[in-house]
Image (cartoon, helix red, strand yellow):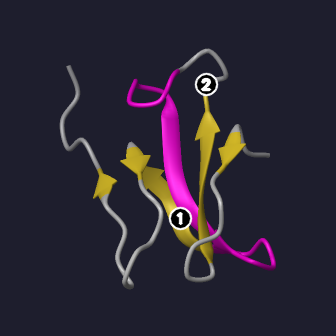
């Protein structure tokens, strides 16, 4: 199940899942993308993501932990 789902842009929507007490940009949520059938196209491996625009989406992935 997902904590939140973005609007579809260019056939994809961002999704996030994780700690229900987490807020966007904080440790605990992971973002990915689904298509209009609900199939995960890009796995939830990112710490933040934006909607697609002109074939691209901005994603953030923290590579180290504190």
Between 43 and 56, the one lying in front of the other is: 56
Q: Residue at x 62, y 15 (%)?
A: 21
Q: Is residue 32 above or below residue 3?
A: below
Q: Is residue 59 above or below residue 66?
A: below
Provide the residue span drawn in magenta. Answer: 23-40
**Quadrant of image for the C terminus:** top left
60 displayed left or right of 7: left
Q: Is residue 50 above or below residue 28?
A: below
Q: Which residue is mark 2?
A: 19
64 displayed left or right of 21: left
Residue 32, position as x, y percentages in the image: 53, 59
Q: Which residue is mark 1?
A: 43
Q: Which mark is residue 5?
A: none
Between 44 and 34, the one lying in front of the other is: 34
Residue 47, position as x, y percentages in the image: 39, 42
- Specify the quadrant of the image occupied by residue 26: top left
30 displayed left or right of 58: right
Q: Residues within 10 Å of mark 1 (few under 14, many from 20)?
A: few
State the SS at label 2.
Answer: loop
- Specify the quadrant of the image occupied by residue 36: bottom right
Q: How many marks?
A: 2
Between 56 and 41, the one lying in front of the other is: 56
């Amino acid at each position: 199940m997902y904590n939140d789902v973005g609007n579809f842009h260019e056939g994809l929507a961002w999704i996030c899942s994780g700690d229900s007490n987490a807020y966007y940009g904080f440790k605990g949520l992971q973002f990915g993308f689904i298509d209009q059938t609900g199939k995960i196209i890009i796995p939830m491996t990112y710490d933040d993501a934006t909607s697609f625009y002109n074939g691209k989406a901005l994603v953030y992935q923290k590579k180290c932990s504190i």
